[in-house]
Image (tube, grey):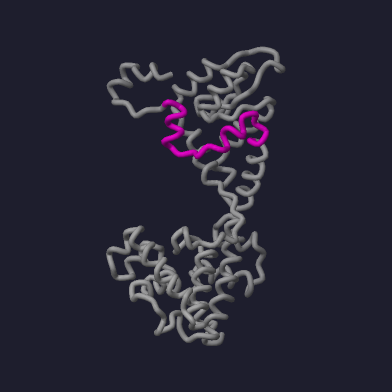
Amino acid sequence: MEDYQEKAWECLTKEEQNSLFLTLSQGLSTWKTGEILKITHYKYLELKARSEKFFKMFSDYFYLYPSLINPKAPLSERFRDYLYGCILKRLPKDEASEYAGDSSWLLKPVRNNHIINNMSNLKKSKDKWDKDLYALIMEFDRWNNFRILPRILQAPSPYKRRNTKKDKIYIKYLHGIPDFKIRAMVDMYWKAGRPDKRYYVAFISDFFKEGYVVVPIKREDNIVNQITDMKIYIFEEQEDAELFGIMVKNFFEKTRDCKSGLNFWKEYRSLINRAINYNSINNMDFTCETLDSAYNLKRMPLPDIMRGKHLKNL
């Protein structure tokens, strides 16, 4: 490689370097490369796009300039060190703030104020090197896997991300609801009757032989509202509730590798989209605290639990 390309290569993380090597040198498919690197396919597509973008971006930049920052640039020493930490050494933001050598940079309001002022100086500079550095910082922030600029300066991300974090929190939480709470909800809501007068919900628990149970419930607004408040999906068809129970029960096994994980999320999203209360639940943010509140789960002293006082919350 040429000198400017070597400088660009050094700006890549080990993961980005491996991505370029496996894709370009070995000619491997994105699926195979993702499996080798042990990341999901859509995450690998982001990594591949980022590594290719960064290598070209830094190559073009170092072809024109001998170093990252113009020695005469109107920048503070702290901001220069911050950029070196973030861009050249690819440190996490907090570590890059420490690298700046000023403990006040660890305070977000202080750091953001310094960054905004220095970026403004770069933008106003008449020097082409400074203007190109400004453009490089903006693109780096846009493509990096975490932001280094305050929100007010950020350009839109180029990635069309489909975030599964909320769904993972939800599914993992369903596996941890105490059996006594599950049994109480089954007893409370199970109402046998004609299929055209029933909706269906699935409760997950190893208490049941299959690891879940599908419960018919009345098609009444107050029942639907109560169950929706507990963030439980309700299905019109029993088969959909059965599939939901199976998918949630087998979640950990079905998301073990890239391909099966991609298939799982595609089928899961299609399934919950058929739930009658999908819009009400999907617009909520799932955290352990909000789910605890939804299921009325509270940390109680052991003596109270042993005396059966927890049953008052059912």
Quadrant of the image occupied by residue 250:
top right
Q: Is residue 189 above or below residue 204?
A: above
Q: Quadrant of the N terminus?
A: bottom right
Q: Is 257 left, or right, of 182 in this rendering? A: right
Q: At which x and y percent is residue 151?
A: 47, 58
Q: Which of the pair 154/100 is nearer the observer?
A: 154
Quadrant of the image occupied by residue 121:
bottom left
Q: Is residue 313 magenta?
A: no
Q: At which x and y percent is residue 155?
A: 54, 62
Q: Is residue 285 magenta?
A: yes
Residue at image x 60%, y 21%?
215
Q: Is residue 224 above or below residue 40?
A: above
Look at the image and give the residue range highlighted in magenta.
Answer: 272-296
Q: At which x and y percent is residue 277?
A: 61, 30
Residue at image x 55%, y 29%?
232
Q: At which x and y percent is residue 92?
A: 41, 63
